[in-house]
Amino acid sequence: MDRRTFLIQTTGTIAAMSTPSLAASTSLTPDEWQTLAAVQEHLFPSEPDSPGAKDINATAYLDFVLAPVEREFIKNGVLQLEKMAQSIEGKQFIALSSEQRERLLRRFETKGKRWISTILRYILEALLTDPIYGGNPNAIGWKWLDHQPGFPRPPANKRYYLL
Amino acid sequence: MSHDFDVCIIGSGAGGGPVAYSLAKAGYSVVVLEKGPWFTEKDFFKDELACCLRGAYTPDLREEPQVVELENDEGGWTSTSSWNFWNGNCVGGSSNFMSGFFHRLKPVDFKLLSTFGPIDGANIVDWPISYDELEPYYDKVEHEVGVSGRIVAHPHAEPRRSPDFPYPPITEHPISKYIDQACDKMGLHAIPTPRAILPYPSLGRKGCSYNGYCGSYGCSTGAKGSSRAALLTQAVATGRCQVRPNAMVSRLVNDHSGKVVAVEYYDKAGQQKRVDAQIYVVACQAIESARLLLLSTGPRHQNGLANGSGLVGQNLLFAGGGAGSGRLPYAKFSQEKVEVLRNFGPFINRALQDWYIIDDPAFGPRQKGGTIDFVHRHPNPVARATRQIRGRKGLVWGKPLKDKLKAHFSEGPYVKIEAFCDWLPVPDCHVTLDPKIKDKWGLPVARIRVGFHVRNLQIGWYLAARGAEVLRQMGAEDVISFAAGAPPTNLLAGTCRFGDDPKTSVLNADCRAHEVENLYVTDGSFMPTGGSVPYTWTIYANAFRVAERIVEQLGT
């Protein structure tokens, strides 16, 4: 199955629900998604005056966008991060304080830079791509950065994987 | 002998469109084979994922890789499949996604060798035609494709038959005026950049909507003069031109006489099909055109079609040059001016050609320079935001990333410099067939060696630095300028250079293969040297010129 076919099939499932569901994932467990969501929120925190990962549906967007090969890469990163959290702090990532998360992720960065930058890239996609893809709800990211989108914007039946 | 069509054109971009248009209008039957799908204005949206992040208009690299060889630190070559030079596989090709900066070549570009002499390590030659021979066709493109602009006098202005462009300039951003003022002070000649964009409805197309997203995007109004919108639509309307999308040509079949007798292609379902014509025109962009000729061996063409000289694929050209940028910080301007600077949609459209020839003793002997374009920073938000995650001490995230994003997006517009100089033809910049890797149809893929001449870098640095001086004069901050050896991936030429001698060129002066009487190549492949401007206008003009030769050949 190629990426396009995969995306069309999975988005069929997603489109059937009002919001993309974590249950649509095939290879990450709910616990792993929880860790990912915590990592995303640490990398891109919500603040009173600006949106963070949870405000832009970053986790659902990641689930929607990951191709099978990358999904494995993300999952492996979660497993390694959790392993590191256990060996250094004796706790799960989500049980750590903000300072501990920062320390751990900086340490993880020395070998896992590509993993963190991949997560960051998809957070920024969730922040700034067209809301039709599930991130950037109500153009919250565009509004925050005073960004003016182009027109016409893509309708649901002309999303890139349907072209 | 009857044929399916009079002319079969392979590739529907800037090289194929003018031929289809001219031949169909002249009463000949034409088939255009395009490997990609047929999108129209109704399919183009301002979707960064589609155009740029997921490459919806280029092939899946796992199905159709290209192999790129880059020079490594040891002086050898390292190959990678992570790079590629696909630029828009759909009807109209990459002209759908161009910015449409339309500069003509200048008379000097047709005789670089005789004007400046040889350069060590570069295969420079004069063209077999002069500027005067191409000039009528530049003019034709202005009218048939639609070029907007305004002529101003400057020291390196090329001669032209009509006093001004048929369309006035598209609406300009207030920054253009600041550039003019800075250039006036510096004694430079800012030129309104001609654009292949209609400022208002004409030629059966709509005018520009000024939504701020142009280059890299398909045009949703038809204002951009893509081969599809400007030429193929009209060609099809004659009833004599058929465009077949999703048709991947695998071979030009050639017989014992050495002539091309048919084209074999795969349709969307993967079925092999065949079509024949009196004359065949190859226009798949320089890399893929060379690949197709190399794949099309035959009894008289053992080393590839029209390749007796061994030069098919050689002397590949990209666009040399440099780049730079500066920011006009809102904090430095009055509230009134800030409101003006916030304007989003109109174009900057300024260029400098004061250094098209560099006569600067501090820099060296009189030599070929180039063009500097001033443009908006590309508006794509994800691309801009993603650059902010790189920090001096590793990745930037958390609150520092958010602060950086806020500052980047809201503290004032950037002005960007794009400098164009000749990409000198060198032996280490070429296309061959990869000995191992094949695409999904089982055809060997293009192996592209990307060597460059150090002169590209020197001129690129020089021009970018001149552009940066203008930005500083405007009051811009954080001004940077630079050049790099790695080529931009969107401007391709060379690989089938034209010339008078069959031993040293692939095509004759009419862009017909020396060795194959019914084969023409009309994309940028014919160019033996590239000039110091983007190629599209020259490709259009030359294809219109060659179309007249094809009409003559068919008429005899």
Image: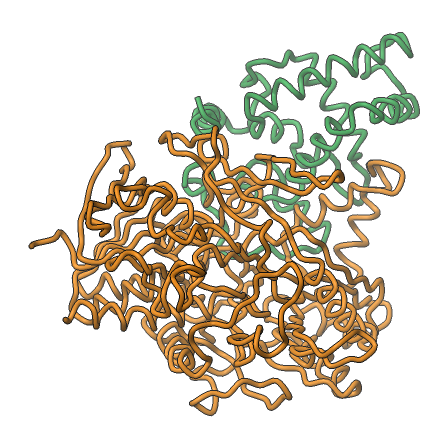
Residue furthest out toward the front: B503
Q: A98 or B267: nearer the eye?
A: B267
* Left or right position of B385 against B126: right
Identify the coloring: by chain
Q: Nearer the viewer, residue A124 or B95?
A: B95
> At 64% from the left edge and 11% from the top edge, which residue is drawn?
A29
What is the count of numbered marks? 0
Image-based side of B69 in relation to A35, left or right: left
Taking B506 as reference, is B37 above or below it?
Answer: above
State the image quarter where residue A125 is shown: top right
Using the rendered view, name the quadrant where residue B282 is placed.
bottom left
On screen, residue A156 versus residue A45, left or right, reads left
B250 and A141: which is toward the camera: B250
Above or below, B349 relative to A57? below
> In the rendered view of the protein, which quadrant contains the C terminus of chain A?
top left
Q: Tell me if residue B312 comes above or below residue B421 in the rendering.
A: above
Q: Is residue B411 visible?
A: yes
Can residue B36 be seen here? The reply is no
Residue at (27, 38) in percent of width and height: B267
In the figure, the shade used to draw chain A is green
> Which of the 4 quarters of the picture holds residue A37?
top right
Residue B108 spot, x, y in % from top left: 56, 79
For the N terminus of chain A, the quadrant is top left
State the image coordinates of residue B140 (x, y, percent, origin top left): 37, 78
Where is residue B23 drawn, in percent x and y? Answer: 23, 67
Residue in the foreground of this view, choosing between A162 and B309: B309
**Residue at the extreme left of the image, as rendered:** B1
x, y percent for residue A70: 61, 24
Q: Which chain is orange?
A: B
